Amino acid sequence: MVILVAAVTVVSTALGGVVALRHRDRLHLILGFTAGVLLGLVSFDLLPEVFELSDGGHWLNLPAVAFPFLAGFLVLHLVERWMGVHNAHEQEYGDHHHTPNLGIAAAGALAVHSFLDGVGIGLAFQVGAPLGWAVALAVIAHDFADGLNTVSLVLRHGNSDRRAKLMLVLDAAAPLLGAASTMLFSLPGTVLALYLAFFAGFLLYLATGDILPEAHARHPTRLTMLMTVGGVVFIGSVVAIS
């Protein structure tokens, strides 16, 4: 089941890449909705599950799960800044210094976090099917934007379409490999809580520090914000009835 669900992320990533190669009309609405889905998943599903699985332990008189949550947010922020991902997002094609290797490296960083997305799916299914399906739904929505960003990053740094397609294949395969890896191990509840806390911080950064700025970069419209609210309501409804 986990492999079949993860396989859908391959299709989602590939579709995002294909759209990036052809056109980007109205994509701000899709990105806005995706950010809302991720915010809803973190708020309504992941964090409650983290505290339920946690043994209530404390580090330095602070909740233990707070540390991996913050780490997930900050690690991705630091990686993206180091790789120059946001500089690429903020520039148009042709309006930058051509640095092909940076484009490939940044796309590789996206593939790494796509692998972690797959691990998140697999571990969520270890908790239970409802959480597994909710996480999978959010990752599938996010991976469309991931495929879009992978191709955009590679092309914006002066690489060829062929290189963009190769990096897209790598990014599309990454979550499937990540999900498959969780079939080789299982985690006790307290350790699983720590990983899911890390994953929640990871997704929170993607929504607020990556996808939403991209969605509003060229289209600061009320409709984009409404799509974000719609994404939150959608995932909230899914969690409520599951």
Image: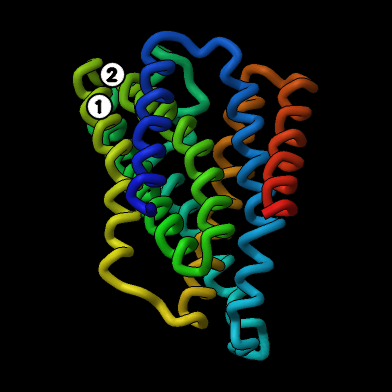
Task: Judge by depth and name the residue closer to the eye, 240 or 149.
Answer: 240
Q: Is residue 72 visible to us here?
A: no
Disc 1 element:
helix
Q: Which mark is residue 28?
A: none
Residue drawn at the location 43% of the way across and 16% of the way down: 19
In the rendered view, does 156 fall on the left or right side of 164? right
Q: On the image, which quarter does residue 36 sit in?
A: top right
**Could you tell me which residue is drawn at 30 percent across and 72 percent down?**
185
Colouring chosen for the image of the structure: rainbow
Q: Bin the neighbour count of mark 1 within 10 Å (Cα to Cα): few under 14, some 14-19, many 20 and up.
A: some
Distance Cα–Cα, label 2 vs label 1 = 5 Å
Q: Is residue 163 above or below residue 127?
A: above
Q: Position of residue 188 (x, y in %)?
A: 44, 82
- Residue nearer the viewer, 214 or 136: 136
Image position of 128 with respect to 37: above or below: below
Q: Which x, y percent locates residue 222?
A: 80, 22
Q: At x 57% / y 19%, what residue is drawn?
A: 27
Q: Amino acid at mark 1?
A: Pro
**Residue on which the image places disc 2:** 158
Indicate left or right for 172 with 68 as reference. Answer: left
- Please rate how many residues cluster around mark 2, counting C-alpha atoms within 10 Å: few if below 14, some from 14 to 19, many from 20: some
Secondary structure at badge 2 equals loop
Q: Nearer the viewer, residue 188 or 20?
A: 188
Q: Position of residue 25 (x, y in %)?
A: 56, 10
Residue at the image point whose x is 27% and y is 40% from the top:
173
What is the three-letter code of the residue carrying label 2?
Gly
Q: In this rendering, is residue 4 above or below 161?
A: below
Which callout, 2 or 1, points at the residue further toward the start of the chain?
1
58 vs 194, left or right, is right
Is there CB contact under 8 Å for labels 2 and 1? Answer: yes
Task: Give the residue pinned by disc 1.
Answer: 100
* Residue 192 visible somewhere in the drawing: yes
